[in-house]
Amino acid sequence: MVTIVVPVYNARSSIEECLASIAAQSYRDWECVVVDDGSTDGSGDICDRFQLEDSRFKVFHQANRGVSATRNKALDAASGDYVAFVDADDALMPDAIEKLVAAIGDSDLVVAGMRHEYRDGKTKIVAPATSGRFELLPRETEKMLDLERKFLLYAPHEKLYRRSIIERFASRFEEGCSYGEDLMFNFGYLEHVGAISCIEDPIYKYRISGEGLSAAYRPDQFSQDYSQWKLVRSFYESKEMISRQLDEYHFKRLWGIVYDGLFAYPKQESKRGYIESILDIPEIASLDKHRDVFSCSNWIKKAILGRNKFFFKAFFRLRK
């Protein structure tokens, strides 16, 4: 049986379509654990109606605690052999669960494609390069890099997990974390994965509004982005899954994290030691080896690689 987890918070405009797409699945052996996280717009009433009409829906209501606590409550109530996650503003293709179950075999995780749906009506397919199974071994680094480049390892949706692994290693979403909790959950789970199966087909409708935390300024932007970069990098190093292409991709991302962190300084001026906290990271030396993978002015690169804190402080004072 598959447990489908749906966290809900003020999703009245989309939750009916979401739950209806689950009720219409061609694969019938599922339960759907819906947790209403203190909605005030009537979303909870819609969820209750689905529970009355189909006993496979199990609805819980709680005071607002955030999406991590909401998913964790659903995991505590899960009884399936496998777990899939669906967000309340998204939906599944009719054969999504059937394809996920068919693909898992002796793998520990299935990663499928998804269809991005934008507010202007445009769509985009994001999917693994090929369908099939691969083991988390050094020779398969490029297959993992394909998934990472497409951000298919970062969210919990369009995937199938083994609940036995989730429970054995007490895998839960970190509560109180406002950004990146999905990545932390996935890479914690990946530590215990032997093989991954991929599905090229887009089985998940992912609605993109252009709003949310990813589009907003965050006071802890650098520290959060950098800690998550280290988490991902550490995973690949522990698996000895390192290649030239992977290095280029990872250090291009780190260049961006450092650059964005520094140029957020005008909003961080009251934070003592902020610039120092960025330029003192040990990976600055490695950035020097990958200076050509990131595009920005040479004077900025030289100041970063030279850890020139006083230069940046003077630059921002003059610009102000």
Image (cartoon, grey):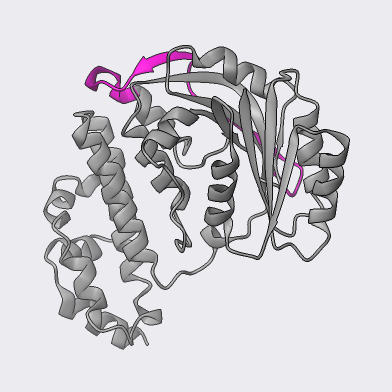
**Quadrant in the picture for the N terminus:** top right
Question: Is residue 126 inside the magenta stretch?
Answer: yes
User: Which corner quadrant of the image does residue 266 belong to?
Assistant: bottom left
In the picture shown, does residue 305 fall above or below 237?
below
Asked whether, in this view, residue 320 is left or right of residue 160, the answer is left
In the picture shown, does residue 163 fall above or below 39?
above
User: Which region shows up in magenta?
Assistant: 118-142
Q: Residue at x 17, y 61 (%)?
A: 281
**Residue 63 in picture, x, y percent from top left:** 66, 65
**Residue 45 in picture, x, y percent from top left:** 84, 54
Is residue 127 shown to the viewer in this render? no
Camera-side residue of 276 and 18? 18
Camera-side residue of 219 and 182? 182
Q: Residue at x 46, y 39 (%)?
A: 151
**Residue 215 in picture, x, y percent from top left:** 55, 61
Question: Is residue 309 inside the magenta stretch?
Answer: no
In the picture shown, does residue 21 fall above or below 211?
above
User: Which corner quadrant of the image does residue 299 belong to?
Assistant: bottom left
**Residue 61 in picture, x, y percent from top left:** 71, 56
Number of numbered labels in the structure image: 0
